[in-house]
Image: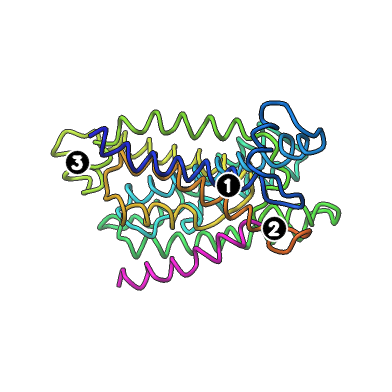
């Protein structure tokens, strides 16, 4: 069992380290791997050390944390709903978190208040979507998907209203943040620690998640406490989404693309999928952010543009298959 889990996770870890190394070396000034090693040890040119240690490294680690958080949140939602189209962005969780964070910003709040507001918005959006989608016969994939799309569109309208009523001097930063921006991500450790803690907590629940993925009735028959486990997934997905949104704004489709691709390659064992999503999601967003800041350098693209270009065709492909 350990060998079966260890090989793919080791390969994904190597890919993550290679993506981080690429992110540290590529930019306005190219830095070789040998120079990066010297800089990480506190040696080398002072200007290059400042560029790597204070600009590129925090941004790359933040991108890794956000990508991992979104991918794990997407994997949890897909287990809960037994639907490969489930994703924090598509189902409106990111929109709810964005509403909460923007409201806190407009109120002059910062720090923990923004994170708490984003978590409250994501949790409220979760309950709203599931409440509206739960008809007399329970959830269905099509009903839930349509409800999530409608709620996400509604949050988009509310965000537009908030932007229209916002002071003009705040609009550029808010707009760029809504498109997904890692330019000002300077504190990667809180989301990284949250990602690590989530994986540590959820991996022992992998067997129960595997059973829940077959349906709540089968899970209950096999002794799984279905309702507490579902509540755990609700809260965990909302918390992960809120942490990602407060770090980098609204970034879509990472939670859709990464879990689905990993299931095609590795199967559907959540004990493997959840840590693999953390590594693969982080790697994907690090590469996307590196591309976003170098494609039209010295100008930078929002990283959400890159993930959308990847995610929209994937979403349409999955929607076509689900017919």
Residue ID for mark 3: 219
The circle on residue 3 is none
Q: Position of residue 119 (x, y in %)?
A: 55, 39
Q: What's the distance in space between the residues labelled 3 and 2, CA to CA?
A: 48 Å
> Farthest residue in the top direction?
42
Q: Quadrant of the C terminus?
A: bottom left
Across and down, in percent, residue 195 comes to 49, 35
Q: Residues within 10 Å of mark 2 (few under 14, many from 20)?
A: some
Q: Which mark is residue 294?
A: 2
Can residue 120 be seen?
Answer: no
Estimate the spatial distance between the alpha carbons at disc 1 and disc 3, rounded to whole Å. Answer: 31 Å
Q: Position of residue 133 (x, y in %)?
A: 37, 57
| Residue for badge 1 | 97
Left-right relation of 247 to 5: right
Q: Farthest residue toward the right?
A: 169
Q: Is residue 308 magenta?
A: yes
Write the start and end of the magenta stretch as one range: 302-323
Mark 2 in CB contact with mark 1 (< 8 angstroms):
no
Q: Main secondary structure of the magenta part?
A: helix
**Neighbours of disc 3 within 10 Å: few (<14), some (14-19), many (20+):** some
Specify whether residue 115 is painted magenta: no
Q: Earlier in the sequence, mark 2 or mark 1?
A: 1
Quarter occupied by the N terminus:
top left
Q: Position of residue 322 (x, y in %)?
A: 31, 68
- Mark before the other along the chain sequence, 1 or 3: 1
In the image, which is nearer the foreground, mark 3 or mark 2? 2
Q: Are marks 1 and 3 in contact (CB under 8 Å)?
A: no
**In the displayed structure image, the side of residue 91 where residue 291 appears, left or right:** right
């Amino acid at each position: 069992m350990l060998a079966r889990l260890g090989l793919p996770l080791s390969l994904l870890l190597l890919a993550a380290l290679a993506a981080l190394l690429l992110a540290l070396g590529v930019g306005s000034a190219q830095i070789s791997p040998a120079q990066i090693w010297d800089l990480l040890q506190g040696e080398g040119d002072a200007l290059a050390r400042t560029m790597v240690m204070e600009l590129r490294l925090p941004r790359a680690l933040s991108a890794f944390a956000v990508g991992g958080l979104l991918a794990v949140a997407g994997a949890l939602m897909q287990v809960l709903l037994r639907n490969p189209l489930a994703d924090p962005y598509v189902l409106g969780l990111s929109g709810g978190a964005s509403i909460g964070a923007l409201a806190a910003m407009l109120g002059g709040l910062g720090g923990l208040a923004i994170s708490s507001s984003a978590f409250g918005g994501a949790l409220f959006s979760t309950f709203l979507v599931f409440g509206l989608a739960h008809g007399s016969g329970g959830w269905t994939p099509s009903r839930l998907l349509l409800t999530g799309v409608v709620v996400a569109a509604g949050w988009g309208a509310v965000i537009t209203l908030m932007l229209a009523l916002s002071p003009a001097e705040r609009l550029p930063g808010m707009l760029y943040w809504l498109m997904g921006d890692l330019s000002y991500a300077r504190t990667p450790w809180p989301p990284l620690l949250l990602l690590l803690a989530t994986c540590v907590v959820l991996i022992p629940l992998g067997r129960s998640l595997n059973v829940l993925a077959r349906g709540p009735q089968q899970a209950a028959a096999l002794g799984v406490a279905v309702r507490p486990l579902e509540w755990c997934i609700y809260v965990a997905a909302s918390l992960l989404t809120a942490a990602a949104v407060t770090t980098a704004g609204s970034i879509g489709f990472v939670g859709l693309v990464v879990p689905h691709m990993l299931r095609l390659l590795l199967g559907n064992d959540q004990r493997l999928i959840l840590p693999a999503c953390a590594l693969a999601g982080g790697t994907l967003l690090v590469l996307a952010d590196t591309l976003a800041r170098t494609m039209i350098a010295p100008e930078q693209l929002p990283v959400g543009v890159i993930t959308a270009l990847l995610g929209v065709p994937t979403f349409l492909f999955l929607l076509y298959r689900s017919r």
